Image: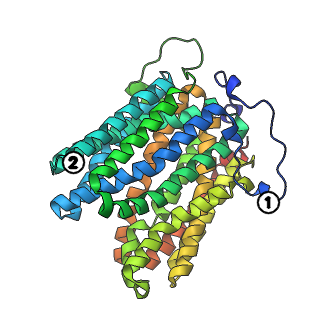
């Protein structure tokens, strides 16, 4: 294997933040529990703690915006247009933000972008509390917020490799992903409970206050300037293109992106959940069935994170990604074939566990196999893939479900994931051979 794909440079910024001595090996049930070693590093603990607060807060806004748009327009189409209004700037600024993150002090970039997200949340609150009721204003604010998110996400994730040692990247990924998945479950439930009690404006305000905690946590991080003393770097189209060339020249990175694209585009069946809830599992109550289906994958992902100690110390990261994507495909196919709601829930939860494993090890590969000067751009592409893949899946599964029926479309998609992933693994050995 090409050594440039598996080596990492020494951490020049976080020596003083590292624990004094390695933790002793865990025995018994502790081997299965979440690996919390990265939390012993103060800088990473601050970054992670801010994620705990904002994981739920961000979901309050994610629920409040479409709810407010629907209340104004009484049209689901406008809710869809708003989603598109947020997606386009997020994609553009994630790609550019990755290049920016490779040229500046990432701590400063995080301060600016988190402050920008907080200001947009305050503006969301302002328009709601004043009763402006303007869809145009809401869509503009959403576009600005997602642009800041696109700039923020690559810098945030790329910074982790400067805060924790390479052997703990998978554990750090599991900690972060578990928090985010917990937010996906708890945030919407909390929003649904709070809207009748305090109203929409206060949801925006809670998110804004949570973001202040994030800004303070980032302020306390160490400086994270670009490594090396070379000439000042730029962050233009040429640098973004250089990031894509870097991916194409490093097969393990390319395969990690392709693995996620295969899993999400062909195996994410959420567009068919409403139809399945009505036609296949309607005997349980359409509302209950729909809630169970949407909760299945995040619940499984949270469970996978809580017991991530069983896999976060694995060193064959490539095989972990391959196994996770294949497991995802098998679980999705099983979901498509199941006619019982609770069996379907079990398969979706198993898919969520597989998705957690895939996220953890794909993230670790991106941080360990790329040099620091390219990590921001790799995370920018990663953000686009993660955001874009499920949306393409919505179109593909919606079309296939109409043509072949929802269960056949889901089962066929899961089987296709298995075939494509095994084919990629057999054709390109770089991912199979990658270890840390």
Give whichever of discs 1 and 2 has the lower sequence position. Answer: 1
Give me the disc on residue 183: none
Quickly name the residue at label 2. 129
Query: For the residues marked 1 and 2, what is the alpha-carbon distance in whole angstroms?
Result: 50 Å
Q: Is residue 114 visible?
A: yes
Indicate the secondary structure of the residue bearing disc 1.
Answer: helix
How far across and down, in percent of the image, does residue 344 sit? 53, 77
How far across and down, in percent of the image, does residue 264 sit? 48, 58
Q: Circle 2: is it few (<14), some (14-19), or many (20+) Cα within 10 Å?
A: some
Give me the residue at 38% from left, 27% from top: 237
Q: Is residue 364 left or right of residue 295?
A: right
Indicate the secondary structure of the residue bearing disc 2.
Answer: helix
Taking depth in this image into account, of 343 and 269 the one nearest to the observer is 343
Q: Quadrant of the N terminus?
A: top right
Quickly name the residue at label 1. 29
Residue located farthest toward the front when viewing the structure as drawn:
197
In the figure, 69 relative to 90: above or below? below
Q: Is residue 345 left or right of residue 21?
A: left
Taking depth in this image into account, of 164 and 90 the one nearest to the observer is 164
The answer to the question of whether label 1 and label 2 lie on touching residues, with beta carbons closer than 8 A, is no
Q: Is residue 100 visible?
A: no
In the figure, 321 relative to 346: above or below? above
Q: Circle 1: is it few (<14), some (14-19), or many (20+) Cα within 10 Å?
A: few
Give me the residue at 70% from left, 32% from top: 7
Quadrant assignment, res 356: bottom right
Q: How many numbered callouts?
A: 2
How far across and down, in percent of the image, does residue 214 sit? 47, 37
């Amino acid at each position: 294997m090409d050594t440039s794909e598996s080596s990492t440079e020494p951490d020049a910024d976080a020596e003083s933040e590292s624990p004094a001595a390695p933790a002793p090996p865990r025995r018994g049930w502790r081997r299965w529990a979440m690996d919390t070693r990265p939390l012993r590093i103060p800088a990473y603990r601050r970054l992670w703690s801010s994620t705990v607060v904002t994981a739920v807060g961000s979901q309050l806004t994610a629920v409040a915006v479409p709810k407010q748009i629907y209340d104004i327009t009484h049209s689901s189409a406008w809710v869809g247009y708003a989603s598109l209004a947020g997606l386009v700037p997020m994609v553009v600024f994630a790609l550019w933000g990755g290049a920016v993150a490779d040229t500046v002090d990432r701590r400063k970039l995080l301060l600016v972008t988190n402050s920008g997200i907080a200001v947009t949340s305050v503006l969301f609150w302002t328009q709601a509390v004043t009763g402006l009721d303007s869809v145009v204003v809401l869509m503009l604010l959403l576009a600005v917020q997602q642009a800041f998110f696109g700039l923020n996400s690559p810098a945030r994730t790329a910074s982790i490799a400067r805060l924790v040692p390479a052997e703990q990247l998978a554990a750090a990924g599991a900690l972060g992903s578990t928090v985010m998945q917990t937010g996906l479950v708890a945030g919407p439930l909390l929003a649904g409970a709070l809207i009748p009690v305090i109203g929409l404006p206060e949801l925006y305000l809670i998110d804004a206050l949570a973001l202040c905690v994030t800004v303070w946590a980032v302020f306390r991080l160490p400086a994270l300037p670009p490594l090396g003393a070379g000439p000042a770097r730029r962050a233009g189209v040429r640098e973004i293109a250089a990031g894509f060339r870097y991916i194409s020249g490093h097969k393990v990175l390319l395969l990690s992106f392709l693995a996620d694209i295969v899993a999400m585009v062909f195996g994410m069946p959420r567009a068919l959940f409403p139809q399945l809830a009505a036609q296949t599992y309607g005997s349980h109550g359409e509302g209950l069935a729909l809630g169970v289906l949407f909760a299945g994958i995040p619940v499984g992902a949270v469970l996978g994170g809580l017991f991530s100690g069983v896999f976060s110390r694995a060193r064959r990261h490539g095989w972990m990604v391959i196994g996770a994507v294949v497991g995802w495909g098998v679980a999705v196919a099983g979901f498509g074939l199941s006619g019982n709601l609770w069996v379907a829930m079990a398969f979706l939860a198993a898919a969520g566990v597989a998705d957690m494993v895939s996220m953890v090890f794909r993230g670790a590969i991106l941080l360990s196999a790329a040099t620091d000067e390219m990590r921001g751009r790799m995370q920018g592409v990663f953000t686009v893939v993660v955001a874009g893949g499920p949306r393409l899946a919505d179109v593909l599964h919606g079309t296939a479900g109409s043509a072949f029926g929802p269960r056949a479309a889901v089962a066929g998609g899961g089987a296709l994931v298995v075939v494509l992933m095994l084919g990629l693994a057999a054709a390109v050995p770089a991912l199979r051979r990658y270890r840390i």
